[in-house]
Amino acid sequence: MSRPPAYANRTGRPPGRTVRALGVVVPGVARVRRQAEPYADAWHARSREAALAPGRRWVVLGDSMSQAIGAEGPDRGWVDQLLGRLGPAGADLQVVNLSATGARVPDVVDQQLPAWAALPAALSPLPDLVTVMVGSNDLFSGARHRTRLPDAMAELVSRLPRGSVVTTLPQPRAAARLANRHLDEAARRGHLRVVDLRTDGPASWRGKLAADFFHPNEAGYAALTDAFEPVVRQVLRADL
């Protein structure tokens, strides 16, 4: 698979100071964080094969939530849970997961979209199914990234192909609300399909979080799968 040489499901940045500090005092943070490297390696290897396989390509963009960080394996997050639920509807989907732990919206624009563009030509006549879940790290990485989030989301929306499936940000913060406006407007224009985690995400995260109390566990990823499934099924039906 041809990709920019520096990209292998990693942003190239070390964990932030807050994560490093919490990892010292909260054992669960360090334990979950140790998943980042092996999960990135697993997705990179799997995606290399998938990009060359026959069938429709499913391109996954985003952050650690699409890497399955917090679950017991990289194949037990929402991506593979959804693939399993789709049954015959997803039988020919080849998952090319370009997400990266720690990714922010600009990382999707600057790293993941170019990595997608560098893939070999698809072997299916159908367009790539594109899903995006990103933005939480922008909100929690400090004021500078949070302030830039709405404009970054607007740029991402402008770069995504028509029909891409993108999650809203459910966090009750001003930057999230402003970023969501760009997604809502794109959905009204018919440019994007939105998985609305403000209304269709988990009503409660009780019992659904990993040991770091931030990432989902497998039950949490199942709840995210509940939100993704009807929207992705609509896309697959529309393209038949």
Image (cartoon, rainbow, N blue to C red):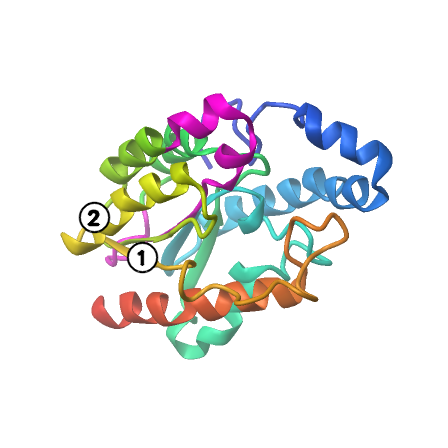
Q: On the image, which quarter does residue 160 sit in? A: top left
Q: Which mark is residue 116?
A: none
Q: Earlier in the sequence, mark 1 or mark 2?
A: 2
Secondary element under disc 2, as helix, strand or loop, is helix
In this figure, which residue is indicated by the disc labeled 2?
Answer: 186
Q: Secondary structure at mark 1?
A: strand
Looking at the image, residue 127 lies above or below residue 234: above
Q: Is residue 156 above or below residue 127?
A: above
Outermost residue to the bottom = 88
Please report the bounds of the magenta region as a residue range: 122-149
Compared with residue 232, is residue 18 higher up or lower down, i.e. above or below?
above
**What type is the residue that disc 1 sits on?**
Val
Whether the magenta-drawn stretch holds residue 124 is answered as yes
Q: Residue furthest left?
A: 189
Residue labelled with disc 1 = 194
Q: Give how far across and how far down residue 132 sits, in percent.
A: 40, 48
Disc 2 residue type (three-letter): Ala
Q: Closest to the observer: 205 or 165?
A: 205
Task: Using the rendered image of the protein, determine whether residue 3 is visible from the camera's viewpoint.
Answer: no
